[in-house]
Image: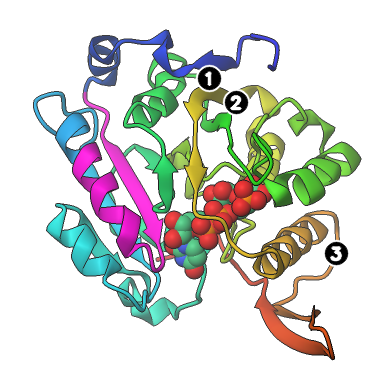
Amino acid sequence: MPRRDSRTFRWNDWSLDELLAAKGEARVSLVVPAKDEASTVGAMIESLRSVLMGAAALVDELVVIDSDSTDATARVAADAGAVVHAASAIRPELGSYPGKGEAMWKSQFVTTGDLIVFMDADLVEWDTHFVPGLLGPLLTRPGIELVKGFYRRPGQHGLDGGRVTELVARPLIALDFPELADLVQPLAGEWAIRRTLFESLSVPTGYAVELASLIDTARLRGIQTIAQVDLGRRSHRHQELLDLGVMATQILSAVARRSGGRDLESVTLQQFRPSEDAIASSKRTVLVAERPPAKEIA
Ligand SMILES: O=c1ccn([C@@H]2O[C@H](COP(=O)(O)OP(=O)(O)O)[C@@H](O)[C@H]2O)c(=O)[nH]1
Ligand SMILES: O=C(O)[C@@H](COP(=O)(O)O)O[C@H]1O[C@H](CO)[C@@H](O)[C@H](O)[C@H]1O
């Protein structure tokens, strides 16, 4: 467990009443980026709405950004009460990239919250307290600008979830960004940020959005503006290993860009799928483009 320093908290360090009192006039947007999550997004939206948007209106708007899902994600989310936008339909004049980061970057143009909370849409073990937990430091400590969730993550052999975290993100942090080393889950998809900060950040269009926002926030505002909250346990739908190769490529590209490397649009990733009698090779184009700070967009 990380030492209980001044920027590591637990979700129940605040009561809902304390947070509602601290919220005052501040507006909170809860943004859920989703691609092909029809099996989980409906239950999540229903729970979040009923607990956080009823009388105790900690959340002012609940928005799902759909990344051209091929399943019923958009309808299921809308039926559950979310406002749903197709990422590609937001500010179409700005073009459209696939990717989680693209959905999160575009969410800025269709939300109004002073505080933005992000949650993944594929959670199977989670709870609504994730949201007040993430908001706690932002509502009670003016010096905090970004809050990361952390949790125990059931994986294939116990609490060993987070393959890209352990094999890519943590080694990169150790090598180039030791100031981030105390963050237990640097890639957590549950996090919250002040809009005035997020709109100042360049946003990778793919899966590098989480690590890039930490690196850039530490540089722009100082490590002391980043906090983390123990949210308990969280498990999600796991991608296949080769698909995490795409995620790792995007994360490595974003870090290279921040370490003086090339600003690439895409990288060709060659992978192999062995079978008994052959080893099939496949090349996939991995997009590593980034979006400029939203505040620079007219
Ligand atoms: O192009 C994409 C890819 C992913 N996601 C969402 O981003 C979150 C995290 O993605 P994923 O579950 O694929 O990553 P993992 O949790 O396996 O790291 C999920 O809510 C996805 O539906 C998205 O909105 N657009
Ligand atoms: O932490 C990780 O290594 C990856 C993959 O997790 P698993 O190996 O499937 O448990 O999951 C995280 O990383 C993504 C990229 O930042 C985030 O989008 C996900 O929300 C987060 O679950």
The image position of residue 256, as x and y in percent, is 82, 60
Tell which circle, 2 or 3, labels the residue nearer the N-terminal end. 2
Residue tagged 2: 225
Q: Amino acid at mark 2?
A: Thr
The magenta stretch spans residue 40: yes
Q: Amino acid at mark 1?
A: Gly
Q: How is the image coloured?
A: rainbow
Residue tagged 3: 261
Q: Is residue 16 visible?
A: yes
Tell which circle, 1 or 2, labels the residue nearer the N-terminal end. 1
Spatial CA span between label 1 and label 2: 6 Å
Left or right: where 298 falls relative to 62: right
The magenta stretch spans residue 65: no
Question: Which residue is depicted at the point 80% across and 88% down?
Answer: 281
Q: Residues within 10 Å of mark 2 (few under 14, many from 20)?
A: some
Q: Is residue 283 above or below residue 36?
A: below
Q: Are marks 1 and 2 in contact (CB under 8 Å)?
A: yes
Tell which circle, 1 or 3, labels the residue nearer the N-terminal end. 1
Left or right: where 137 falls relative to 292: left
Question: For this rendering, which residue is in front, 215 or 245?
Answer: 245
Residue tagged 1: 143
The image position of residue 285, as x and y in percent, is 69, 83
Q: Amino acid at mark 3?
A: Gly
Question: Which residue is outermost to the front?
Answer: 276
Left or right: where 68 falls relative to 6: left
Quarter of the image containing the N terminus? top right
Left or right: where 99 falls relative to 50: right
Q: Which residues are magenta?
A: 25-48
